[in-house]
Amino acid sequence: MRRAIALALEGIDANAGGPFGAVIVKNGKIIAEGYNQVTSQNDPTAHAEVTAIRKACEKLGSFQLEGCIIYTSCEPCPMCLGAIYWARPQKVFYALHREDAAKIGFDDQYIYDELGKTMDMRQINFENISRDEALPVFEAWSQKEGKTDY
């Protein structure tokens, strides 16, 4: 956890993005780390956890983080939480709470609130189009032999 917190400070010093750091450990050794790089990379997905997950998966040659532990300087936002669940680590430790982040301008509550709304009630307009054209792609996936399920 100390390394994740140190990475958060490194990110601040590098003017990379917000004050967040993450480390991924497997078998007691750090295999990947990252800090928030949203503003320096012009990438809204370049959060500390996502950055570390990408590096760890590349190093492991896998899209899953089986047997890994994530240490993050703050409770993951909704996007990072989704990425963590898709990566399936063994455990996550976090230092600060999302309420701590909200106090310094990183308030994700509106996203949590949006997830509970129907599509027609969300702040960003979502409209379903071309479903009939897209369905054959899912059918092709469903029938594909030798695919890697996840």
Image: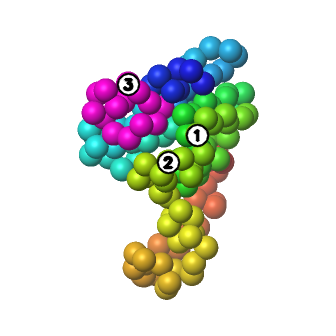
Residue 118 located left or right of residue 149: left
Residue 73: x %, y % from top left? 54, 34
Question: Quick check: 91 above or below 113?
Answer: above
Residue 26 located left or right of residue 73: right
| Furthest residue toward bottom | 120
Residue 76: x %, y % from top left? 56, 45
Lower position in the chain sequence, tag 1 or tag 3: 3
Residue 112: in sight, yes or no? yes
Q: Is disc 2 surrounded by few (<14), some (14 to 19) or many (20+) residues within 10 Å?
A: some
Question: Quick check: 85 above or below 58?
Answer: below
Q: Any mark on residue 101, and which?
A: 2
Instruction: Indicate the amino acid at tag 1.
Output: Leu
Instruction: Indicate the amino acid at tag 2.
Output: Ala
Residue that appears at 42% across and 77% down: 123
Residue that appears at 56% across and 52% down: 99
Q: Observer-nearest residue: 102 or 138?
A: 102
Q: Is 124 included in the stretch rendered in magenta?
A: no
- CA gap between label 1 and label 2 equals 7 Å
Residue 32 located left or right of residue 84: left
Lower position in the chain sequence, tag 2 or tag 3: 3
Q: Which residue is mark 3?
A: 10
Image quadrant in which you'd find residue 29: top right
| Furthest residue toward front | 103
Q: Any mark on residue 96, and which?
A: 1
The residues colored magenta run 8-21
Residue that appears at 43% across and 42% down: 47
Lower position in the chain sequence, tag 1 or tag 2: 1
Q: Observer-nearest residue: 14 or 136?
A: 14
Please state, as top left, top right, bottom left or bottom right, where the N terminus lies in the image: top right
Instruction: Indicate the amino acid at tag 3.
Output: Glu
Mark 2, secondary structure of its residue = helix
